Image (cartoon, rainbow, N blue to C red):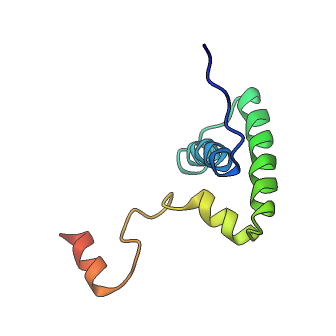
Amino acid sequence: MGTAASRNPDDLIGQDLNILKEYAERVIVHGDVLFATEEDDRETRFRNFAEIGDSFSLTERDMVSMLFDGMFHKGPKCWCAECRLNDVI
């Protein structure tokens, strides 16, 4: 028996977000090029991500932050003295 696809918006945005993050990292960080099928998938997932984000009243900034969170900086999430010290240790 197959598994049913989730219709929960939280699950859908999470699935799309994870794959969009993978595509973005491959292209932006590693300089790869997506295959035509992946580019079509990226466009569809991004449209879904934007629609669901809009339904939750997320701003464009919120959605971009979600997409690129942790991609460029692997340091402490907070820049307080304690977090910076823990990142070094």
In this view, 23 is above or below 52: above
Asked if residue 32 lies left or right of residue 7, the reply is left
- The quadrant holding residue 60 is bottom right
Quarter containing the N terminus: top right
In this view, 84 is above or below 37: below
Front position in the image: 63 or 68: 63
Labels in figure, total: 0
Residue at x-position 58% and y-position 59%: 68
Quarter containing the C terminus: bottom left
In this view, the residue farthest toward the left is: 89
Where residue 59 appears, x then y in whole percent? 75, 71
- The quadrant holding residue 40 is top right
Front position in the image: 82 or 13: 13
- The quadrant holding residue 66 is bottom right
In this view, 3 is above or below 47: above
Where residue 33 appears, x then y in whole percent? 66, 37
Where residue 39 appears, x then y in whole percent? 75, 36
Where residue 86 appears, x then y in whole percent? 23, 73
Residue at x-position 45% and y-position 64%: 73
Residue at x-position 68% and y-position 44%: 12
Asked if residue 10 lies left or right of residue 50, the reply is left
In this view, the residue farthest toward the top is: 1
Front position in the image: 31 or 14: 14
In this view, the residue farthest toward the front is: 1
